[in-house]
Image (cartoon, helix red, strand yellow):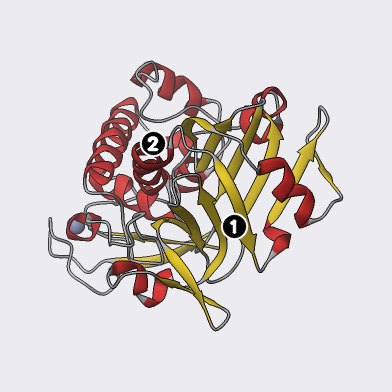
Amino acid sequence: MPELPEVETTVRFLRKKVRNRAFIDVWTDFAKMLQIRQGSTGQVKKGNFEDFRKQLKNKKIQKIWRRGKNIILELSCDKTLLIHQKLTGHLLVGYWIMDNGYWKPKSRGFLGEKVNTYIHLLFTMDNGLMLGLSDLRKFAKVELWDTEKLKESKAILSLGPEPLAKDFTFEKFKEYLKNKKGKIKQVLMNQEVIAGIGNIYSDEILWEAKVNPCKEIKRLSDKEIKKIYDAMRKILEKAIKVQGESISDYRTPTGERGGFDKFRKVYRREGEKCSRCQAVIKKTKIGGRSAHFCPKCQTL
Ligand SMILES: [Zn+2]
């Protein structure tokens, strides 16, 4: 699943390419992924795709930002599109043409690679540029909200702080963690504690910090918490710089691989040697999710 660095990469690209553009049309072959949210609770409005299409038409994208793993497009007329790419979804920018019932990229290149060809949603902008969503598993969600309602919604307010925010200091991080229970990996991945970190980066952060993913929060020393905090900022910033990780389905909006693979130390590297101490990297399960770690430099 795209995590903070991948979503941030997408958001930065979209800002360059589609900010100040207006939607002129939207196409989908899976209307279930689109929802109109309304009222103070943002309940799902029973409607159809035509409703969604009508409401989106001619709306201009005024502001593009990220909150956790959500992509947020603020539109004219106080509407906002919230996009969560979930497991395999990733937004792509380019030009496509319909060919025998399939959207084919207009020119040769990365957009034609298999992972980018599961186009189930396609927006056309007023300058002809298109914004597509390739999503093999079709779990992605695209919701149309009233802007003010979204900002007050649980979807946004329940999220924990942004790990890279300037005011998210070590002191605040420590305060935040001290009130939590559970194993550090699970807590790092809990979106209501800290927003944007998932399976890949929690493993990488804990390896960098030399902390075992199964360690209980209450057993962490201040020194360990500081190491986790520093590793979190370092790894996430590094990953954004190289445009994220593409070990799974994520690709940048041009359809290219992110460059974090070169820096990936433990995630899906079980059986390989730890680059720091040469011990063999192990994989375990924590609450149904996998965790990868070095048993020698991340002792419990
Ligand atoms: Zn090691």
Nearer-N-terminus badge (1/2): 2
Q: Name above or below for residue 27 compared with residue 177.
A: below
The residue shown at (43%, 41%) is 18
Q: Nearer the viewer, residue 52 or 148?
A: 52
Residue 62 as seen in the image, left or right of residue 264: right
Estimate the spatial distance between the alpha carbons at disc 1 and disc 2, rounded to whole Å. Answer: 21 Å
Residue count near mark 2 (Cα–Cα under 10 Å), binned few <14, some 14–19, many ≥20: some
The residue shown at (60%, 41%) is 82
Query: Label 1 amino acid?
Result: Ala
Secondary structure of residue under mark 1: loop
Q: Position of residue 187 (x, y in %)?
A: 51, 41
Query: Label 2 amino acid?
Result: Arg
The residue shown at (41%, 61%) is 95
Of discs 1 and 2, which sits in the foreground?
A: 2
Residue carrying label 1: 140
Q: Determine the quadrant in which ligand 1 lies.
A: bottom left
Q: Position of residue 202 (x, y in %)?
A: 39, 48
Residue carrying label 2: 15
